[in-house]
């Protein structure tokens, strides 16, 4: 099967999922159309043709894909369009996230040809999965993309829509409340960057050093984009949680991939 357009869609608060998705997309020839679901840059619903390709990536938060990302992905539909799915997690577990992502895209008219769960540095506790994806991870990602491209090449035009045997359980894991939220410090000059780029609107314009914990999804976006490096996780609760989390999840995990047979 030869594709005309490659549609690349991702929710990527700290830009790692974007990096992985774009790395995968380089293995395919065609016009690349990009959708940043982090900032919801889709003005109106988009329908992909059967000879298009969707490459979609989501981070994993507490075993699920982020609610804003899931809602924004619903605007992209297909007509039995092939899709490549990726979930990116911080070396703990991806639980039901990949299954949830697959269920969404199948419900939107896509047929998955491959899926992968890849490891990145944890967005809340960066000591876990530090500096990942590393060289070994990129080799796995490149192999995954290459195998996906070969599957797509031999895919017939009228292929059946069916799910991949990805890990996960339904009903999905109930995500718990994350009691940790980044805060700003005295280096904040109220430039407004974090307010503008927060994917959940959790930073009040009148007080950008604070965070609305009811809206915050602890994605780390504000930390990464702050020009003054004024935002961070901290406090006694954070340090206690970090010590426990690092001890429980410090052992290296590897990617898991699934392919259409």
Image (cartoon, rainbow, N blue to C red):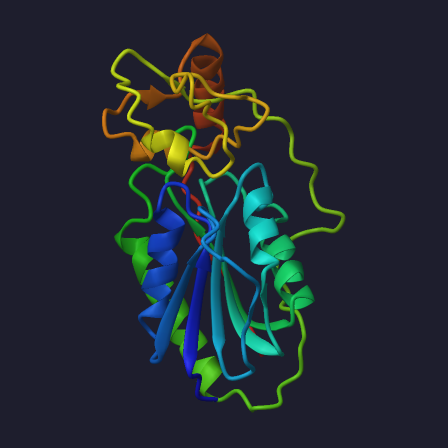
**Residue, far top:** 236
Q: Is residue 242 above or below residue 62?
A: above
Residue 166 in the image, given as x and y percentages of width and height? 61, 61
Q: 249 and 132: which one is in front?
A: 132
Asked if 4 appears above or below 24 in the picture, the reply is: below
Where residue 236 sits, quadrant-wise, is top left
Residue at x 34%, y 22% (from the top left corner): 231
Q: Is residue 167 visible?
A: no
| Percent x, y of residue 126 | 36, 31
Q: Which corner quadrant holds the C terminus?
A: bottom right
Q: Quadrant of residue 76?
A: bottom right
State the count of labels. 0
Compared to residue 182, the image places residue 132 above or below, namely below
Q: Position of residue 14 (x, y in %)?
A: 37, 41
The residue most toward the right is 171
Pick the front one: 164 or 123? 123
Residue 53 appears in view = yes
Q: State the residue at coordinates (65%, 35%).
A: 175
Judge left or right: residue 108 versus residue 189. Answer: right
Residue 229, horizontal then vertical, whole percent = 26, 25
Q: Residue at x 32, y 13 (%)?
A: 185
Residue name at image x 44 percent, y 88 percent = 2
């Amino acid at each position: 099967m030869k594709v005309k357009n490659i549609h690349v869609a991702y929710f990527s608060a700290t830009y790692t999922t974007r990096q992985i998705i774009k790395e995968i997309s380089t293995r395919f020839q065609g016009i690349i159309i990009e959708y940043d679901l982090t900032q919801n840059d889709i003005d109106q619903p988009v329908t992909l043709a059967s000879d298009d390709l969707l490459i979609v990536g989501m981070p994993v938060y507490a075993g699920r894909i982020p609610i804003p990302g899931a809602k924004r992905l619903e605007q992209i539909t297909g007509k039995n369009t092939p899709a490549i799915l990726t979930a990116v997690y911080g070396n703990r577990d991806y639980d039901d996230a990949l299954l949830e992502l697959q269920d969404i895209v199948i419900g939107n008219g896509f047929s998955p040809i491959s899926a992968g769960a890849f490891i990145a540095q944890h967005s809340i506790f960066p000591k876990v999965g530090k500096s990942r994806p590393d060289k070994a991870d990129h080799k796995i990602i490149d192999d995954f993309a290459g195998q996906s491209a070969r599957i797509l090449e031999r895919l017939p035009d009228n292929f059946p829509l069916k799910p991949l045997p990805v890990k996960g359980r339904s009903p999905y894991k109930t995500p718990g409340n994350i009691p940790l939220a980044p805060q700003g410090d005295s280096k904040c000059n109220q430039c407004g960057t974090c307010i503008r780029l927060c994917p959940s609107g959790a930073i009040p314009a009148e007080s950008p050093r604070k965070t609305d914990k009811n809206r915050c999804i602890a994605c780390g976006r504000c930390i990464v984009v702050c020009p003054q490096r004024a935002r961070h996780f901290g406090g006694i609760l954070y340090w206690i949680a970090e010590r426990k989390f690092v001890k429980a999840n410090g052992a290296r995990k590897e990617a898991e991939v699934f392919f259409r047979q």
